[in-house]
Image (cartoon, rainbow, N blue to C red):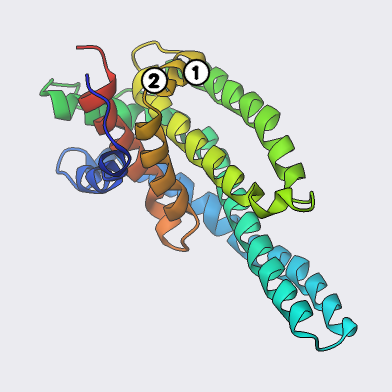
Amino acid sequence: MNNPGFAQSASYVATGWKLVRTPGLRRFVWMPLLVNLLVFGGFGWWINSWATSWLDTLALFSQWGDWWIVNALQTVLHWLVTLVLLFTLAFMFTLVANLIGAPFNGLLAERVEAHLVGEVADPAPSWLTLVKSVPRLMMSELSKLIYLVICIVPLLILQFVPLINIVAPLLLFLFGAWMFALEYMDYPMGNHGALFKDVRKAMRKKRKAAYGFGSCVALLSTVPLVNLFIMPVAVAGATALYVDHVRER
């Protein structure tokens, strides 16, 4: 069990893409993919209209004249607000999708791990198996939500504090990357009985791995169309990262 670097950990997203297209694993990808399509597809139009309305308020600067500094400030604020909105909303919708698809994500992680370590899994899971996993997964998702609210509220407030708001988007992105790593690493580790606090403890020891993998997932989650497929890919990639570098040998 070694400590992979930032770039090496980020590459596990590509590994996840290869895994979800592997014969024998594809059928376990459809439900997580369908959940993601419904969540992002259903709310995508709302994000666009709401963000556009929000950004239109920045046009108020135009009444101050045609000074270059006003135009420059308007441009900077436009991109700043756009990035913060895109990242925050993408992150929130990803959490909703993971909450709904948690049982299927746990199953996908289980099958990916079995494939990677050469174990033979049952040909098809029963609905009873999925139902039994729901209480544990829901408690885990609740723990993530509490942790998210405690941490993200101060970060969102910082976006509106003068001077500090220059670096606040970077802090928000780093926290989002950290949360994405915890979110997806929770599935393979949770299959072995780990609680969310155990996942946090394990990833604190491998911060480069967490930020490398999480940053890649965070960036892809803000890209239209790509974010529709990121959930099952990230589950598979996180499971491969767990098998190679996190699990106890």
| Residue 38: percent from left, percent from top | 51, 52
Query: Does the rendering let one see residue 6?
Result: yes
Label 2: which secondary element: loop
**Quarter of the image holding residue 99?**
top right
Mark 1 = which residue? 196
Cα distance, mark 2 to mark 1? 15 Å
Lateral position of residue 65 relative to residue 71, left or right: right
Q: Nearer the viewer, residue 108 or 93?
A: 93
Lateral position of residue 40 relative to residue 150, left or right: left
Residue 120 drawn above or below residue 212 = above
Lateral position of residue 149 relative to residue 97, left or right: right
Please identify the residue farthest to the right as the structure is shown.
63
- Amino acid residing under circle 1: Phe
**Which residue is located at x 43 percent, y 34 percent?**
181
Residue 243 drawn above or below residue 135 = below
Query: Does the rendering let one see residue 124?
Result: no
Mark 2 = which residue? 205
Q: Residues within 10 Å of mark 1 (few under 14, many from 20)?
A: many
Q: Count of labels shown? A: 2
| Residue 30: percent from left, percent from top | 34, 45
**Which residue is located at x 41 percent, y 13 percent?**
194
**Image quadrant where one finds the N terminus:** top left
Among the two numbered marks 2 and 1 on one chain, the one whose residue lies closer to the N terminus: 1
| Residue 248: percent from left, percent from top | 25, 12
